[in-house]
Amino acid sequence: QVQLVESGGGLVQAGGSLRLSCAASGRRFSSYVMGWFRQAPGKKREFVAAISGISTYYADSVKGRFTISRDNDKNTVYLQMNSLKPEDTGIYYCAAARGINERTVVAGAYDYWGQGTQVTVSS
């Protein structure tokens, strides 16, 4: 069993930056693929980025602006978000799974989810 707790969301102006964190409990954190998803009001949850042990993968909409990383010693995954746009607004969720790779973009493939953290980007 893995429990995930996100933090770092908030209100920021367009062009600004935020760093999200996701702290995981449980063993063998390094064996999990960790992903970030987001959900805007009235829209489906969408893939943002994922990281395996050595590789990362990004949605086209965030490529070049967002960076996912992990610290296995701290059981934490991060999402550095730069050059934020109003369309980045939404609830950001951390997710974990084993047996997949970093290019897995379907939310249903992930087994564990955090409660989400709100990111609001004003224009």
Image: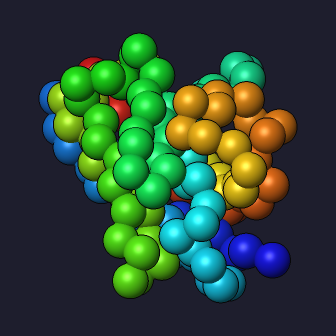
Q: Is residue 40 left or right of residue 88?
A: right
Q: Is residue 10 left or right of residue 110?
A: left
Question: The C terminus is located in which quarter?
Answer: top left
The residue lying at 38 percent from left, 62 percent from top is 70
Q: How is the image coloured?
A: rainbow
In the depicted structure, whether residue 68 falls above or below residue 106: below
Give residue 14's position: percent from left, percent from top: 22, 28
Q: Is residue 59 visible?
A: yes
Q: Nearer the viewer, residue 92 or 119?
A: 92
Q: Nearer the viewer, residue 33 or 123?
A: 33
In the depicted structure, whether residue 13 falls above or below residue 28: above
Marker count (numbered) = 0
Q: Quadrant of residue 12?
A: top left
Question: The N terminus is located in which quarter?
Answer: bottom right
The residue lying at 64 percent from left, 32 percent from top is 104
Q: Nearer the viewer, residue 104 or 25?
A: 104
Q: Quadrant of residue 43?
A: top right
Q: Is residue 38 left or right of residue 19?
A: right
In the depicted structure, whether residue 72 falls above or below residue 60: below
Q: Nearer the viewer, residue 46 or 57?
A: 57
Give residue 95's position: percent from left, percent from top: 65, 53
Q: Is residue 91 visible?
A: no
Q: Is residue 5 left or right of residue 54?
A: right
In the depicted structure, whether residue 7 falls above or below residue 120: below
The residue lying at 40 percent from left, 16 percent from top is 61
Give residue 28's position: percent from left, percent from top: 62, 78
State the residue lying farthest toward the top: 60
Give residue 42's position: percent from left, percent from top: 73, 21
